[in-house]
Amino acid sequence: MSMTTEALKIDWATMPTYNTIMSLAAGAGLLAVVIFGRDLFRLRRNNDATLSTDGWSLAFGVLGLILTTTGLHMTLTWPLAAGGFPFDNIIFGETSLGFGVLLLGAAVYLWRRGEALTSAPDPIASAAHTVRPLSLFIGGLGLSLFAIAAAGITYQLFAAPAEEPISGAFAAYPIIEATFMSGLFAVVGVGAVLFPFAIAKLRTAGAAASGLVKTIGIAWSLTGLAFLLFGAMNYFTHIGLIIHTM
């Protein structure tokens, strides 16, 4: 008596999936925040340095628009629930929405107040005073990322089906991808949780915050690059998954 395993079939018309562009934009957004911060510190150290706030406003606006629209749609409509992944709407949708709105806020601020920021005696302290009220929300997002990471490990989420190229090679070992993705969310969360403390110190004593700033920069640089590369790779893997499961 032979046993056959039924091939996985997915009705993609009822489950639009666009966390590829979300991952790409989130990774680019994290990297952009780090690079902008470095430029701002360079401006404080050297008055002759230049900083194009128009360019950064454009960058944050484009990335923020992508993350806000896709995150809002996923948060309100739960498109991934039809395929049996309702939790992914929370994990990817709500986090992208929160980050996207923050980036849009930064874009509007730099567009309207960029010149005042760059001409301030201490642009870092000026930026810290401005962002201080939002830092509480950023810290809260960090705590939510810790919760997502804990859920990912506890329930072994994020595992790709065997039909997905590359990632599907680990389908029999779901803890591998669960650990990888949960780790990324947790490290981003470390930077977000430390952010309010760094802002509090930057408002008064910038040098005292150097350790916190470096830790945040490293955390967001590494995870930003990882999300960007992972999102780019997923254009191949998700297309392959669609072809294999149509």
Image (cartoon, rainbow, N blue to C red):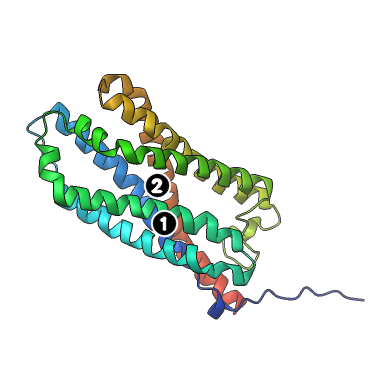
Q: Residue at x 64, y 45 (%)?
A: 153
Q: Mark 1 or mark 2: which is in front? A: 1
Give the crowd class for mark 1: few <14, some 14-19, many >=20 residues within 10 Å. many
Residue 188 location, x and y as percent? 45, 41
- Precedes in sequence: disc 1 or disc 2: 1
Amino acid type at image mark 2 = Leu
Q: Residue at x 78, y 73 (%)?
A: 5
Question: Which image quadrant: the C terminus?
Answer: bottom right
Horizontally, residue 37 falls left or right of residue 147, namely: left
- Which numbered circle lies on residue 225? 2
Residue 52 showing in the rendered view:
no
Give the crowd class for mark 2: few <14, some 14-19, many >=20 residues within 10 Å. some
Identify whether 98 is placed above or below 201. Answer: below
Amino acid type at image mark 1 = Leu
Horizontally, residue 127 falls left or right of residue 133, namely: left
Q: Residue at x 48, y 59 (%)?
A: 93
Residue 243 location, x and y as percent? 55, 76
Residue found farthest to the front: 133
C-alpha span from label 1 to label 2 = 20 Å
- Which numbered circle lies on residue 112? none
231 or 37: nearer the viewer: 37
Secondary structure beneath dot 1 equals helix
Q: Residue at x 38, y 28 (%)?
A: 197
Question: Which image quadrant: the N terminus?
Answer: bottom right
Residue 141 showing in the rendered view:
yes
Horizontally, residue 65 falls left or right of residue 4, namely: left
Which residue carries the number 1 mark?
Answer: 97
206 or 224: nearer the viewer: 206
Q: Quadrant of residue 232?
A: bottom left
Identify whether 210 is placed above or below 182. Answer: above
Secondary structure beneath dot 2 equals helix
Residue 199 location, x and y as percent? 32, 31
